[in-house]
Amino acid sequence: MALAAAALVLPLAAWAAEGLHYNVRIQAPGELETLLEQNLDLLRFRGNARMDRDQLQRLVRTAPEQIRTLVATAGYYSPVLSVRVDTPDATPTVVVEVQPGEPVRVGEVEIVLEGFASSGGEAFDKDALKAGWSLPEGAVFRQDEWETAKRGILRQLMQTRYPRAQLSESQATVDPDTHKVLLHLVLDSGPEMRFGELRIEGLRRYPESVVRNLNQIRPGDYYNEAALQAYQARLQDTGYFSGVEVSADMSAVIGEQLEAAEARQEGQPQATAASAMAPLPLLVRVSENKRRNASVGLGFSTNTGARTQVNYDDLSVFGLKMKSALTLETKRQTARTDFYFPTTADGYNDSFGAAIERNDIQGEITRTASVQGKRAWGTPRLERSISLQYLTESKSIDRIPTSRSQSLPLTYAVTWRKLDNLLFPSKGYVLNAQLGGALLPLLTDEPFIRSTVRGITYLPLNSKSSIILRGEVGVLASRKKDGVPTTFLFRAGGDNSVRGYAYQELGVREGEATVGGRYLATASAEYQYWVKPAWGGAVFYDAGNAADSPKSIHPKSGYGVGVRYKSPVGPINVDFAYGHATRKMRIHFSLGFTF
């Protein structure tokens, strides 16, 4: 290689001393070519105004060693390479040729676990820890994957029980003759940690129960980082706090370790077992949101028209959280106030509220007033609720008053979610079922039972395309329909129903108006394709209707194309749909996944 470098002196002597320009041509397999293009000094300094023939000679001489170092990180330790300078014209060209040879693969993997003393209870699963090692025997040895594997196994250990674990030794020994690398690493668990008592910092306006009742971590539980993150997320979702930090206070442990070190130096007896370590206090630091907040918003819905909304919230009204809103839309006007109790220690979320609402939909005008009490519980994966509502309603059809009614229904609802992402789902399903009714004549003009089931499923075809299936079925049973408030009857059509039709345009015809029916059935199939990570398109077919009997449901179809955009607040959908029955084209706009 020294002779080859010396032979470069003659062609280099003919080049200008200042501002030397040259080309670099790399001949190597794809992954190595990219690696060298991104890291080789010959390319990094090309175009430098201070480049001259001496500098280029130095880069050419050092290039082979740099190339060997770079390709070794990709698992090739015995490459055959050459670096030469061609001068076919006035501009010299440095030619780099690399034949990587056989890659080095992982041979034996030796993971030594030290410590792991337990203060009682279930023994730590060392086999599971080793099974999580991500660079197995037979894999091509790459430096970045070696570093990733070490960080991964240490991180896995630090997340549960042993947060002060350390990687005390790691070594990769390469045998060029056998093209094998022997991996050796030693993990020191450090002391086993358990949670202690809860400490709260930053509370001023709100009761401690807001924080304590959401805590599912008990004194004596093993340290678990996932449990800390889940607790922090629950506190952030309450709306009481602008900032939340949940952590284990390590200061007590650090102090105890310092005392132990001093005792060792003085030759004093000391406790080294994990059982001697003090529990980690569970520390919650919060920054409270201001108590009162008012906001005004403007918007537009292709279902209910232009919208103006005024919100007023107070986070401490007799110890309860109050949320109120006045919403004025073209087809709907609503005023609502709800009060929320702090989540109980058993995980229940209780609330009560009142609302008045006016709707002018498809020739039917309704005015309702209601009060409601509700209990909800569960997780984002499985939510359940039970509610009791008293509702009074007056109804006009074609501007002619027709009826007044009241009802006191009790409703149970459950929602199952199994999605890969709650904000931008691409795989999984959501299913919601409700069963309720007003069975007694108490504050009820017409007893009834009502049930609905609706769901959506995401079926990925590949990384860019998927199929989305959606459906809803509803049934209301009563002796007669008169006396049942319109709120509990069914209609179809609109953004999240059958596209291609106006909001709740499909139902039972009564004069020139469309009113609700006892039965509902809708279905939708959609194909999505993502041209870019944030932009996609869709084609869809919807069908469905509502009627007073199953035989009277004559599905109306709508179909079209749409645009999809992944915004920071959720997917935005714009659809151009053709209603087959009405022979009209409509634009539909929605935010969030259709359900």
Image: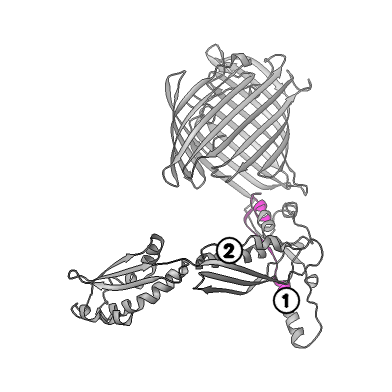
Residue linked to disc 2: 137
Q: Which mark is residue 255?
A: 1
Q: Residue pushed farthest top? A: 511
Q: Amino acid at mark 2?
A: Glu
Task: Check disc 2 and report its element: helix, strand or loop.
Answer: loop
Q: Return the residue nearer the eye: 56 or 549.
A: 56
Counting from the top left corner in percent of width and height, residue 118 is at 78, 67
Q: Which residues are magenta?
A: 231-254
Counting from the top left corner in percent of width and height, residue 105 is at 52, 66
Counting from the top left corner in percent of width and height, residue 460 is at 52, 40
Q: Amino acid at mark 1?
A: Gly
Task: Check disc 1 and report its element: helix, strand or loop.
Answer: helix
Quarter of the image holding residue 449?
top right
Q: Residues within 10 Å of mark 2 (few under 14, many from 20)?
A: some
Q: Return the residue nearer the eye: 116 or 514.
A: 116
Left or right placement of residue 9 versus residue 309 in this view: left
Left or right placement of residue 269 versus residue 549 in this view: right
Image vertical order of residue 12 relative to residue 213, above or below: below
